[in-house]
Amino acid sequence: MSANLFFWIFIGFIVLEFLLEYYLDALNAKHFNDTPADELQDIFDPSAYRKSQAYKYENYRFSKITSIISLIGVLVLLFIKGFGYLDLFVRQLTENSLLQSLLFFGILLIAGSLFSLPFSYYQTFVIEEKYGFNKSTKKLFFIDQVKSLLLSIVLGGIIGGIIIWLYQLSGRNFWWYAWIFVAVISLLLNMFYTSVFVPLFNKLRPLEEGELRDALQKLANSVDYNLDKIFVIDGSKRSSKANAYFSGFGPKKKVVLYDTLLQDLEPNEITAVLAHEIGHYKRKHIIYNLIISIISTGIMLFLLSLLIDNKMLAEALGATEPSFHIGVIAFGLLFTPISFITGLWSNQLSRKFEYQADCFAKQYHNAADLISGLKKLSKNNLSNLTPHPWYVKVHYSHPTLLQRIQNLSRKNCDK
């Protein structure tokens, strides 16, 4: 195969992915006006439902614009050999190949952040503001952007630098050592994410004593779960949307509830949500996801090792010779179809886990409270009640609200 053929394969994959996503988005949008199922009729009154439809359409139109602009930007970058020019630029700055790669990725990261900044700003202060979701100030928005960029540079620089160093030491066999290193990092991030990284952006406080805490403690005791790490996060300073999540394992496990969740739901509904989160822990979903992530990372690193020093791939991107950073870009472009397929499987497994966690909540609390809580969250978030099935399969990590209600309503819950 020639470098020119690889170039057009890159173009083909990018365009094909765009067309597929564009088609799925359009297909999904055609169902925005569908009448919700009988089980969902009590969520919105006519006025609120019209508002939810307008919100969906506005996001859909904005997504179309941003995706077209992004496609044009990537295609222009490829056709003008932008990656090749950037490679030449960093080679002129230093002869150290490790620094060349770090500079290459650092420049791309900063450029990408600046490119996406206007879109993020519009999404936050125009669309989210218009529909009452945005609670962030412009000052906080830009502080978040800077913090995120600096964190990406520091963490990416350290992790990426070590992987590049391993490549320089061991050549194509680097993937073994990189795999072990990334697995350790994944474990550490999973254990310490909430305690180390979340406080950089949000304040966490222990859930205070009272009726809710007592109800949650009673639930935890009934399922033999040590509930000494439950926090409330100040999500309301950025958005009115509510959420809850579980992180870590062993002595480092934590349950985090958004303060907006406490405002939107009744104590019995919050207890049902916590039962769902505990269900993820009890069904070992955190461990399974971590194992799957580590295995898939190993496979990806192995495939990367096969292509990392391919001269034709480098030439296809406009570079004069192979390098680690050019190899990573080429691999990312070639990996697009595989990532689409693995994404389908990953989302399907995730939806199965959500069903199991729902069933756990039904078994150890009750289905009615979870259903009413899910309905309130869908209403407050102006969620799409009628997504197209194909769009769900490709993009949804959770079952639709209707699917969850139907599963919870069955005598034999899908475990």
Image: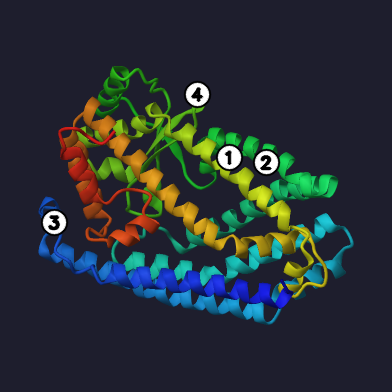
Of residues 300 and 223, the one nearer the viewer is 300
Residue 109 visible in rendering: yes
Q: Position of residue 14 (x, y in %)?
A: 55, 71
Mark closest to the chain's N terminus, 1 or 3: 3
Residue under pointer 2: 179
Q: Is residue 265 left or right of residue 120?
A: left
Of residues 195 and 342, the one nearer the viewer is 342
Mark closest to the chain's N terminus, 3 or 4: 3
Q: Residue at x 26, y 43 (%)?
A: 263
Q: What secondary structure is found at the residue carrying circle 3?
A: loop
How packed mark 3 is, by other alpha carbons closer than 10 Å (few <14, some 14-19, many 20 or more), is few
Q: What secondary structure is found at the residue carrying circle 2?
A: helix
Q: Position of residue 265 (x, y in %)?
A: 23, 41
Q: What secondary structure is found at the residue carrying circle 4?
A: helix
How packed mark 4 is, by other alpha carbons closer than 10 Å (few <14, some 14-19, many 20 or more), is few
**Proximity of marks 2 and 1: CB atoms separated by less than 8 Å:** yes
Q: Real-space Cα distance between discs 1 and 3?
A: 40 Å
Q: Residue at x 35, y 17 (%)?
A: 224
Compared to residue 224, the image places residue 331 above or below, namely: below
Mark closest to the chain's N terminus, 2 or 3: 3
Residue under pointer 1: 294
Q: Please name which of the two marks, 1 or 4, marks the residue nearer to the observer.
A: 1
Dot 4 amino acid type:
Gly
Mark closest to the chain's N terminus, 4 or 2: 2
Q: Residue at x 79, y 61 (%)?
A: 323
Residue under pointer 4: 250
